[in-house]
Image (tube, rainbow, N blue to C red):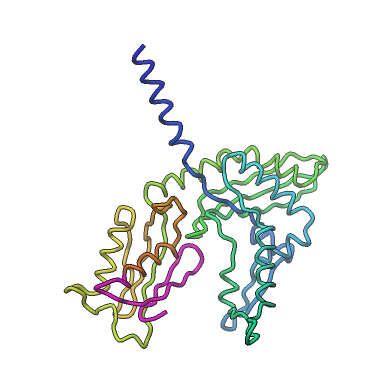
Amino acid sequence: MKKILMYCMLLVGTIPIAAQEKKPTLMIVPSDNWCVQRYFTTTYQDQGSTIRLPDYKLAFQEDAELSGVISKIGAMLTNLGYSLKDCEQEIKTISLRMAENSVTMSKTGGASLMETPLDILKQRIKSDIIIQLGWQVNQESRGKSVTFILEAFDAYTSKRIATSSGISEASNEIIPRLLENAVKSHIGKFDRQMDTYFRNLRVNGREIILTIQCWNNWEHDLETEYGGEELTDCIRQWLSDHTVKASFNLTDATENFARFEQVRIPLFDAKGNALDARAFATELRKYLQRPPYGITSKVMVRGLGEAIIVLGEK
C-alpha cells in the first residue's frame, strides 16, 4: 500500500512540470516559391543588384485561398499545444503603426518622427519558428489534388528544423480542405521534429551571434586593459559565465572588432520571459557600464538572433 501511495505522489508531482513546459510560438507564412509563382513580391536595389522578396501583405489581400489554408493548418498546430501568431493580423498592426507614425508630429515645433528604412525593416513579425507553406494544385480525372511542402525555420538562426511534404487524394473539395487532409497525415512527424529541436534548445541553449565594435571616436579599444586583462578577454569571461555550458566561439577579433558565433543563451530569463539576442546583449551592455569599465555603448539588432554592441557612446 505504501508503494502504491508513493507512486501516486510521484506521478502527481510530475504533472505540473509537464504542464509548465512551454511550446514555441509559431507563425505560418506562404513560402517564397509560392509567392514568386503568383507574383506576390516586392523588389529593391542593393548595390546595383535587384533583390526580390515575398510581399505577404499583397498575398493576403489578393489570394482568396491563403487565409483559409493558413487557418486550417494553424488550427492543427494549435491543437498540438503551440502558440500561434496570425501573420495577416500582425501585418495589419505593423501597417497601422507605420501609418500613425507618418502623421505624428510634436505639438511645439511640428517635427515628425524620425524613421529610417532600417527602422521600418525591423518592424517585422517575431516568433520562435517561421513555418513556410507552399502548395500546387494538380488537375486529375477524379478532380483536384494538392501537393504541399511544409518547412519550419528557427527565426533566430534561419536553420531548417523540420520539413514535410505530400499529396492529397484527388477530390472536388475546396483547396483549404484538400490541404488540411493532406497535411493531417504528416503533422505528427512534423511536430516530433520540432519538439526534438526545442528539447535540444532547452538543454543546450538558443544560438545567437554577438558582435562587438567600437565607434571611431572612442579613445579606447578592445585591447585596453582592465585589471590586467584586455577588454576582449573580460567580455569572453562574462560570456563564459552567462551562456549555457559556457558555449560560444570567438570567430574573429581585432583591436576594434570581435565576433562571437554559436553563442548559446537560455530560452528564458530568470523571470520566465523569452530571451533573445537583444535582451542578452543589453545585459552585457549594462555590465560594461559598471566599474571598472564605465563604458557607454549602444545595442543594435538584426532580427531576433543577432546583436551588435558598439562601444564608446549611444
- Residue plotted at (77% across, 62% down): 61
Q: Quadrant of residue 186?
A: top right
- Residue plotted at (77% across, 40% down): 170
Nearest the eye: 13 or 63:
13
Q: How many marks?
A: 0
Picture coordinates of residue 299, whole percent (x, y): 43, 72
- Residue plotted at (42% across, 75% down): 298
Q: Quadrant of residue 224?
A: bottom left
Task: Provide the residue span drawn in magenta.
Answer: 288-314
Residue 302 lies in the magenta-colored region: yes
Is 204 displayed left or right of 273 in the figure? left
Residue 181 lies in the magenta-colored region: no
Q: Quadrant of the image for the N terminus?
A: top left
- Residue plotted at (58% across, 39% down): 80
Q: Residue furthest front?
A: 108
Nearest the eye: 287 or 148:
287
Vertical position of residue 143 compared to residue 248: above or below: above
Vertical position of residue 220 compared to residue 43: above or below: below
Is 301 displayed left or right of 186 in the figure? left
Picture coordinates of residue 217, whole percent (x, y): 36, 88
Q: Quadrant of the image for the C terminus?
A: bottom left
Picture coordinates of residue 195, whole percent (x, y): 49, 43
Nearest the eye: 131 or 117:
117
Is 40 displayed left or right of 188 in the figure? right
Nearest the eye: 265 or 111:
111
